[in-house]
Image: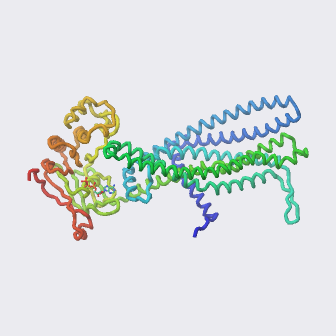
């Protein structure tokens, strides 16, 4: 059974919206830029008030000018033309200043807000954890497309909040100013109630009020579905764009798989969703436009109709009639601001909701990080885990109660079936896997090499030095690293710019990642399948160089590799062994694997 929300519930929802807007908007106005922001805001408010004052002056001018015309008074006519020129100059200056200062404040606000959110998104690996959580909760509990939130929504939010709030301020001040004028120009009318007749003053004001309240209620009724439709429209557009970006990123793999038809189908499906929703949006907007257009047209003629008897009876002059029409127009315009701007408000509300859900997700993440089940101790002289449990995002434990230790001088080969959690164990050592508990003590300056290295687009020297600035290394050091990593062909291309992750072969990308390590000479190295695309000879040479590098640094090396030949470079072996269903209870905490430690066997064994 569906029940209509009560007035109290609606008021509660409205307060909730205001609270949310304040939560998004307030931080900028109390940030380190607060004084500049507040001053600019106050300036904009003052300019808006001056703008309304100009409108009042124009209304008075109408009265004098049209009376002059009716009386065929040339002196008044020319005097009022001069007055008009001054008024117009005042008005133009205010409008230009209002536009410029508003735009400047919007720009500053957007740039502060974008930087602020970017900072939070990049901090504590939130960007990574939100992605993990997105796949863990397919129910949409976590926000989609943070790129869109940061790039598009923040601009829309700051622009729309500024413009809409100023328009509302204008509407309110205009209303107050012109209600007075309209009241003064209105006659009284006789209202018969229960046999008695009352004389009611300010007839035009009451008529405008009834006219607009009716208009607003109807608009709200017609326009309400627009909020949800706009929210979904922005999400569908972002999904479509995201998929296009993925096709571009994986263009080669898709072309090789002959995946064009599937991708085309997927893109078509996403685009159809965009169009379907858009069509609904258009239909809903059509209803709204029909009503607002009728409402606007009727309000041109309405004041003339109701004032005509007084004009023809000689009770008012032409100037007063025109003034009434213009004042009614302003009062009506202010009162029906909501009618005219419902769709903009709907887009703004959808944007606000999206930003709030993004903000909520980041807050929740920060909260979780604070109460992390995994205790970490950096700066340790060795790697040591105590009672370590590593789980999947859905909570399934891969490994439980693990006590592992790697000391300086050690070299460990980690092996196990595919999908057993080797890379996930590395993620846990690195402190980026949030689904772990227990204790990890780790050295700070360890380098983790993932299976697929990230190579930024741009100059080769930047891709090589990443994530450090390339300026920190001499050309000689960079060239030597490339030579040592068996990439002599790239030595002369340090300043070439390219999309390296697409141009270089898989083996070249792995060698570039190794060149990075040889350049930075870390003491501790965690290498995840870093030579899987290389031939056995190159693998042997490069593993030897990596092992020499960590030995020289007084640290240790832990590698994941499937090829037995890699065992030659390691003294110890950890093996992830599947646990029988029956053996999972008890000491192993229900984990899918246990870890066995032993000495590495040479490849020949
Ligand atoms: N972000 C994630 N969300 C959900 N499951 C994940 C995620 N990352 C990894 N897993 C799952 O965790 C398990 C372990 O993955 P992991 O990459 O650690 O395995 P691995 O032993 O390194 O495998 P391989 O030898 O194939 O590289 C797999 O079942 C994988 O599907």
The vertical placement of 239 against 105, above or below, is: below
Residue appearing at x 60%, y 44% in the figure: 163
Residue appearing at x 71%, y 45% in the figure: 174
Query: Do we see residue 184 in this rendering?
Result: no
Residue appearing at x 83%, y 42% in the figure: 320
Query: Do we see residue 143 in this rendering?
Result: yes
Q: Point out residue 551 in the picture as x, y percentages from the top left corner.
A: 16, 44
In-front residue for pair 295/28: 295
Which quadrant of the view contains residue 541? Answer: top left
Q: Find ligand 1 in the image and state its quadrant.
A: bottom left
In-front residue for pair 292/168: 292
Q: Point out residue 233 in the picture as x, y percentages from the top left corner.
A: 52, 50
Seen from this angle, which residue lies furthest left?
605
In-front residue for pair 149/267: 267
Q: In which quarter of the image is the N terminus?
A: bottom right
Q: Point out residue 92 in the picture as x, y percentages from the top left corner.
A: 68, 33
């Amino acid at each position: 059974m569906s029940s209509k929300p009560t007035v109290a519930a609606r008021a509660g929802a409205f307060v909730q919206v205001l609270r949310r807007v304040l939560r998004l908007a307030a931080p900028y106005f109390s940030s380190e830029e607060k004084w500049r922001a507040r001053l600019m805001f106050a300036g904009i408010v003052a300019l808006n008030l001056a703008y309304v004052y100009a409108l009042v002056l124009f209304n008075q001018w109408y009265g004098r000018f049209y009376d002059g015309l009716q009386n065929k008074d040339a002196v008044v006519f020319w005097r009022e033309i001069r007055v008009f020129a001054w008024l117009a100059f005042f008005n133009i200056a205010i409008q230009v200043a209002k536009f410029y200062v508003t735009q400047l404040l919007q720009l500053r606000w957007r740039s502060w807000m974008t930087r602020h959110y970017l900072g939070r998104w990049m901090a504590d690996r939130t960007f990574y954890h939100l992605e993990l959580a997105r796949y863990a909760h397919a129910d949409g509990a976590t926000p989609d497309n943070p790129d869109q939130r940061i790039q598009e929504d923040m601009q829309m939010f700051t622009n729309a909040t500024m413009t809409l709030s100023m328009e509302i301020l204008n509407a309110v001040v205009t209303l107050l100013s012109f209600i007075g004028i309209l009241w003064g120009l209105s006659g009284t009318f006789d209202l018969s109630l229960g046999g008695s007749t009352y004389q009611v003053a300010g007839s035009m004001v009451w008529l405008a009020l009834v006219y607009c309240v009716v208009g607003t209620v109807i608009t709200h009724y017609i326009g309400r579905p627009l909020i949800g439709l706009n929210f979904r429209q922005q999400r569908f557009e972002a999904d479509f764009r995201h998929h296009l970006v993925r096709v571009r990123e994986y263009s080669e793999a898709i072309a090789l798989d002959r995946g064009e038809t599937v991708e085309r189908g997927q893109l078509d499906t996403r685009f159809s969703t965009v169009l379907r929703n858009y069509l609904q949006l258009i239909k809903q907007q059509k209803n709204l436009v029909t009503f607002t257009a009728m409402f606007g047209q009727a309000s041109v003629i309405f004041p003339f109709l109701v004032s005509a008897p007084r004009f023809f009876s000689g009770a008012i002059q032409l100037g007063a009639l025109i003034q009434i029409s213009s004042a009614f127009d302003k009062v009506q315009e202010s009162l029906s601001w909501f009618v005219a701007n419902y769709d903009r408000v709907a887009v703004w509300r959808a944007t606000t909701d999206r930003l709030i859900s993004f903000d909520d997700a980041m807050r929740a993440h920060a909260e979780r990080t604070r109460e992390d089940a995994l205790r970490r101790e950096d700066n340790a002289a060795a790697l040591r885990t105590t009672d370590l449990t590593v789980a999947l995002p859905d909570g399934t434990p891969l490994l439980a109660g693990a006590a592992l230790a790697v000391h300086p001088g050690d070299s460990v080969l980690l092996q196990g079936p595919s999908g057993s959690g080797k890379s996930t164990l590395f993620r846990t050592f690195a402190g980026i896997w949030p689904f772990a508990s227990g204790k990890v003590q780790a050295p700070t300056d360890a380098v983790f090499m993932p299976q697929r290295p990230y190579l930024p687009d741009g100059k080769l020297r930047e891709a090589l030095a990443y994530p450090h600035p390339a300026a920190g290394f001499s050309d000689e050091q960079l060239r030597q690293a490339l030579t040592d990593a068996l990439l002599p062909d790239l030595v002369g291309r340090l300043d070439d710019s390219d999309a390296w992750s697409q141009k270089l072969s898989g083996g070249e990308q792995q060698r570039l990642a190794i060149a990075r390590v040889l350049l930075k000479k870390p003491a501790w190295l965690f290498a995840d399948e870093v030579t899987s695309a290389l031939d056995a000879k190159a693998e042997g040479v490069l593993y030897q160089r990596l092992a020499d590098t960590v030995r020289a640094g007084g640290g240790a090396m832990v590698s994941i590799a499937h090829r037995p030949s890699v065992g030659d470079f390691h003294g110890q072996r950890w093996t992830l062994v599947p646990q029988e269903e029956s053996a999972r209870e008890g000491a192993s905490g229900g984990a899918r694997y246990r870890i066995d430690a032993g000495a590495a066997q040479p490849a020949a064994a």
